[in-house]
Amino acid sequence: MPNGTAYVMDVGSSTITLWHSSNFGATWDPLTYLPGVSSFARARFATDKVGYLTDYSALYTTTDGATTATSWKRLPGPRMAKGDSFGLWELGVTGSTVSVGGEVSGPPHVGCNPPKHSDIWTSHDSGRTWVDARLPGYVGIGSIRFANARDGVALAWEFKPDGNPCEYLGSTNSVYVTHDGGRHFVRAAHCAAHAGELCTAAMFLDSHRLLVGRNDGTMTSSADGGRTFTERPGLPTVIGMQPTKAEQDDWFWIQGFAQAGGTLYATTKFAGAYLSTNSGQTWTRETTCDSTYTLGIGEVAAFDGTRAIAGGPTCLSTRLATPVGAPATAPVTGSAPTGPDTVASAYGLTASVTAGRVVIVRSLRPAASRAG
């Protein structure tokens, strides 16, 4: 928030914790008042007090900054046909616009239980009523971001059976956009121009300009709301712009974008953070993020043009108006971590992400969000 308020959800430890800061990320306090949630949990805040929390089968809201045991109130969520249930993958919040991406399943039975269809539901009245945009095929929503009440962008993985019982593999993804407040999401780009290409971050800079980052540090943009795209210069390295076609290209996997006060921030998987003051035309590497703990940083949120935070696998990186680093310094050397990037599980569903491949394993689960 511009006033220095920030919230961070930690789902990697044995206890899922929501952390709060009121001083631009300089210090943090744990908020222990959480409903029982799984590692699918997501939290987003619209103001310093109003926030939303999703688990795979539930949606909650708070209006007092989650400061008491009764802070979180469960919302009914999108309306389902009798016998159906929803599963929520992702959450996006912009003011009173709340958007959740997930899937609809029928009555559970012994076996794999694939979903009936995938959807993005959007509410413009803080979760009281919803509009439903159904996406084609079986897809997993990776992110949803609205620039305003009308214009939004989502990333979605395309899943196919991988030959193993109850397993579904997602190795390609697409960019979807809406310009009618979430009533329809249409595919604007399929991210498969070459083998291994993925779109890993997307954000509307305004109602028309859309920026998309990839898993090798390259970018593409649209000036007409997603109808056409133009390649943009990639992130700078010591040996040139991405992609360098070197084995370290995946270090520059773009994790997220944020903008405030005329500054655009980008974070990468293992190559630190970058700043742009001209809407992404050129980028400068932020050397203050360089340590063995903060190179692997994830989503980024901006307070203003000089202050931002980014969450990583082991810590939090905080930028408090520090000088911008040299434009082409090398990242800290060393070996990148191995194993899955993320793993989440709940209600008989396990999702793991490794090197850009998403594997879903489904089994019998209770329909905790069933209608009727």
Image (cartoon, rainbow, N blue to C red):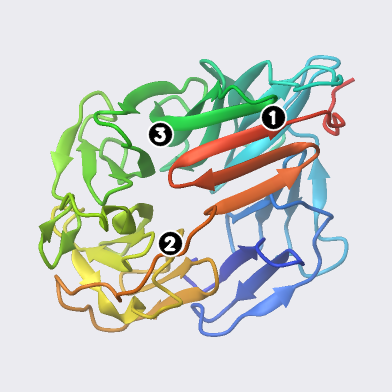
Q: Amino acid at mark 2?
A: Val
Instruction: Give the Cα separation between the discs numbered 2 and 1.
Output: 29 Å
Q: Amino acid at mark 3?
A: Asp
Instruction: Give the Cα separation between the discs numbered 1 and 3.
Output: 18 Å
| Residue wearing tag 1 | 129
| Residue wearing tag 3 | 151
Image point (44%, 32%), residue name: 171
Q: Marks 2 and 1: which is nearer the front?
A: 2
Q: Which of the pair 127/113 is nearer the observer?
A: 113
Question: Is there CB contact under 8 Å for labels 3 and 2?
Answer: no
Answer whether residue 124 is visible to the viewer in this image: no
Image point (20%, 57%), residue name: 235
Q: Residues within 10 Å of mark 2 (few under 14, many from 20)?
A: many
The x, y position of residue 114, in whole percent, is: 70, 21
On the picture, is 167 further left or further right than 4? right
User: What numbered label is drawn on residue 300?
Assistant: 2
- Label 3 residue SS: loop
- Label 1 residue SS: loop
- Reply above or below: 2 against 80: below
Q: Earlier in the sequence, mark 2 or mark 1?
A: 1
Q: Earlier in the sequence, mark 1 or mark 3?
A: 1
Image point (43%, 74%), residue name: 294
Q: Amino acid at mark 1?
A: Thr
User: What numbered label is drawn on residue 38?
Assistant: none
The x, y position of residue 313, in whole percent, is: 53, 66
- Label 2 residue SS: strand
On the picture, is 119 further left or further right than 153? right
Picture quadrant of residue 364: top right
Answer whether residue 24 is visible to the viewer in this image: yes
Picture quadrant of residue 57: top right
The x, y position of residue 322, in whole percent, is: 30, 84
Number of labelled discs? 3
